[in-house]
Amino acid sequence: MSWFDLKGRSLISELDWTREEYDIAMKVTDQMKGLYYSSKPHPYLEYKTFAMLFFAGSTRTRMSFETAMTQLGGHSQFMNPNTMRLSLEDKPGAGETVKDTAKAMARFCDGIGIRLLDDEIKYYGHGDEVMRKFAEHAEVPIINMASDINHPCQSLTDIYTMREKLGDVKGKKIVITWAYTPWVRGRCSVQGTALISAMYGMDVVVANPPEFDLDPNVIKQCHDLASNSCGSFEIVHDMDRALDGATVVFPRNWFTGKRYDIGKEEELMLAQKYQDWRYTAEQQKKLCAPGYLLQCMPIDRGHEADPEVCDNDLSWIYDQAENRLHTQKAILTLTMGGRV
Ligand code: CP
């Protein structure tokens, strides 16, 4: 395995890269962060362009990728699908196909990032399918900037942040707990964090009300990864029991497996039964382990977690957000052929 093996590679699911490949990405991230803090120029992607296709909104992902390309000496191009010719319907009369869009875009750029999830898709798995179709036809790497299933750039950031704060994470307990918010949220961040934490041998506990299970395929992948890494993976339906002994806690809302059949209103009605699912300051104080807050943001303060939990010394949320910049500089450099 060499660093150059990642050149030209896409990153759509956490499972598209091996643990060794993530190790390399984290070594490059260390270098990127060091260069950034020592104010040394690092134009590893000079004259290269990264196109960013955002079907859904973003604060961190858009800013971190744009800043990453600036700092690497290249350019990022923000593409609003509403101003393009593309249609995801892929049928005569609907608009330009994914195939033609992907092939044409690849003539102008060196990598394409895509965010497609939430209200912009028709069924669970649709976002992932479109990204894979782009990867089939574009002759440049496709980087998932959040789909309905996965969020690998966030996941790399999460494991990087945990290792930065804790050192070796093997055997450390991370609790990924469902939390109430009136926002109906996707599963990509929680599934991604579960996958990468299982890959790195953590003791991963997912806590959720019975209706709010994660994707069964992802659950299987987590079990397999945990078994290979000598970590563990468990699902429980009791938040307080799950939190016992947690080094790291990730409280976040996610939708049920029926989200695209029953619609958002019914989803919200189901969620309202569990308004007491929130990571509180009281819960955090009672833990025998620190219960650091890992939350990819945006976070619904007062619903998903108490404001005090977001703001105290055990909160990592802003360092975690910043690390998006450094990890994505590594991903862009490695996949788009930069030389470190
Ligand atoms: N965590 C994350 O992806 O944030 P944005 O939705 O703001 O990009």
Image (cartoon, helix red, strand yellow):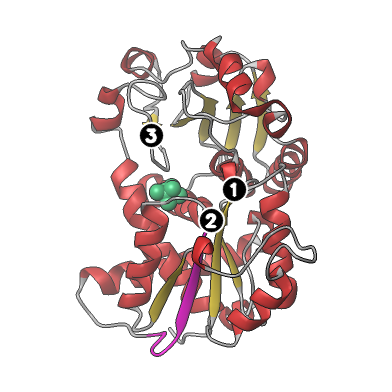
In this rendering, the label closer to the viewer, 1 or 3: 1
Residue 55's disc is 2
Query: What residue is at 62 percent from the left and 16 percent from the top?
Result: 209
User: Is the CB of the residue bearing disc 3 within 8 angstroms of ligand 1?
Assistant: no
Q: What stretch is highlighted in magenta?
A: 44-55
Give the answer, above or below, for where 307 lies relative to 209.
below
**Location of mark 1 (residue):** 120
Q: Return the x and y of residue 208 as percentages of the image width and height.
A: 60, 21
Query: What residue is at 20 percent from the left and 73 percent from the top?
Result: 38
The amino acid type, in three-letter code, at marker 1 is Glu
Query: What residue is at 32 percent from the left and 67 percent from the top?
Result: 33
Q: How far apart are marks 2 and 1 (CA)?
A: 7 Å
- The answer, for residue 122, to whether it is visible in the render is yes
Q: Quarter-wise, where is residue 96 in the image?
A: bottom right
Q: Quarter-wise, where is residue 46 in the image?
A: bottom left
Give the answer, above or below, for where 329 lies relative to 88.
below
Is residue 39 covered in magenta?
no
The amino acid type, in three-letter code, at marker 2 is Phe
Query: What residue is at 77 percent from the left and 35 percent from the top?
Result: 216
**Location of mark 3 (residue):** 299
Name the quadrant of the N terminus: bottom right
Question: SS class of the residue under badge 3?
Answer: loop
Q: Are marks 2 and 1 in contact (CB under 8 Å)?
A: yes
